[in-house]
Image (cartoon, grey):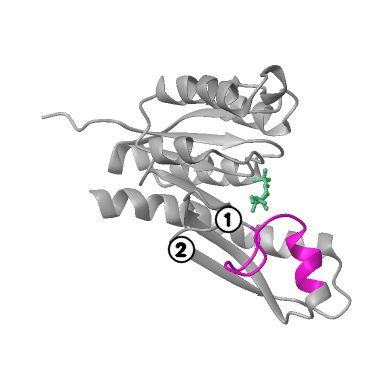
Amino acid sequence: MARQQQNIVILISGVGSNMAAIAQTAARQAWFDRLGVCVAAVISNKPDAPGLKTARALGIDTHIVAHAGFDSREHFEAALVASIDSYAPALVVLAGFMRILTPAFVQHYAGRLINIHPSLLPAFPGLHTHQRAIDTGCRFAGATVHQVTAEVDHGPILAQAVVPVLPGDTAAALAARVGTQEHVIYPQAVRAFFERAA
Ligand code: GAR
């Protein structure tokens, strides 16, 4: 019997480097042939997100659901859900998707919605994580892949990477160091999600 294809839909707002890391790892490791897993679509809430161009260059369907065009979070999310669900995704991946999601949205994708956050959660949820880690005097920083729950930047932890905070670090330097590790752990965590389910 033919194995059912399992679609991933990735949501972005910006550069999309994590999206690209996942899509390139999926291609390099032949996730479709091995696991039936396909990065089916990339959806951005920002029409000018550079990651859209990257996704197209990787041969992935792209869509824009611009939050600015809607009069409420609920109407925006209804359009977003319609776009996502047209791919019947097994997993929805937030990769630098910078919108707060309603509990109804999170519930709709319960168990199949994950995020990456640029800190060692539960430390530093929210914005400006690198500067806050430096200002706090942290010796270590990092990134966390987690299941998404109704509370922003919370939820069961799936993977973490730790990097040192070096003397004289700027937020940009630390972000680059963390970013390199994000591109390792996020593809690993996505693959592990499907291997667990197999
Ligand atoms: C990443 O560093 C990710 O951890 C962060 O946004 C960046 C997106 O970069 N996400 C959050 O802050 C979510 N709370 P990318 O667009 O190049 O993947």
Task: Determine the CA span between mark 1 and mark 2.
Answer: 10 Å
Number of other residues with Cα within 10 Å of mark 1, as a class: few under 14, some 14 to 19, many 20 or more: many
Q: Which residue is mark 1?
A: 153
Disc 2 element: strand
Which residue is drawn at the image coordinates 53% and 49% (left, top)? 115
Q: Position of residue 117 (x, y in %)?
A: 61, 56
Number of other residues with Cα within 10 Å of mark 2, as a class: few under 14, some 14 to 19, many 20 or more: some
- Camera-side residue of 163 and 117: 117
Q: Position of residue 160 (x, y in %)?
A: 53, 67
Q: Which residue is mark 2?
A: 157
User: Looking at the picture, does residue 16 appear above or below residue 161?
Assistant: above
Q: How many marks?
A: 2
Query: In the rendered structure, which amino acid carries the disc numbered 2?
Result: Ile
Q: Position of residue 122 (x, y in %)?
A: 57, 68
In the rendered structure, find residue 57 and report the number of the disc placed on it: none
Which residue is drawn at the image coordinates 38% and 31% (left, top)? 89
User: Looking at the picture, does residue 195 appear above or below residue 99?
Assistant: below
Magenta: predominant secondary structure element?
loop
Q: Is residue 177 visible?
A: yes
Dividing the picture into quadrants, the one containing residue 11 is top right
Residue at the limit of the structure toward the left, as seen here = 1
Which residue is drawn at the image coordinates 83% and 74% (left, top)? 135
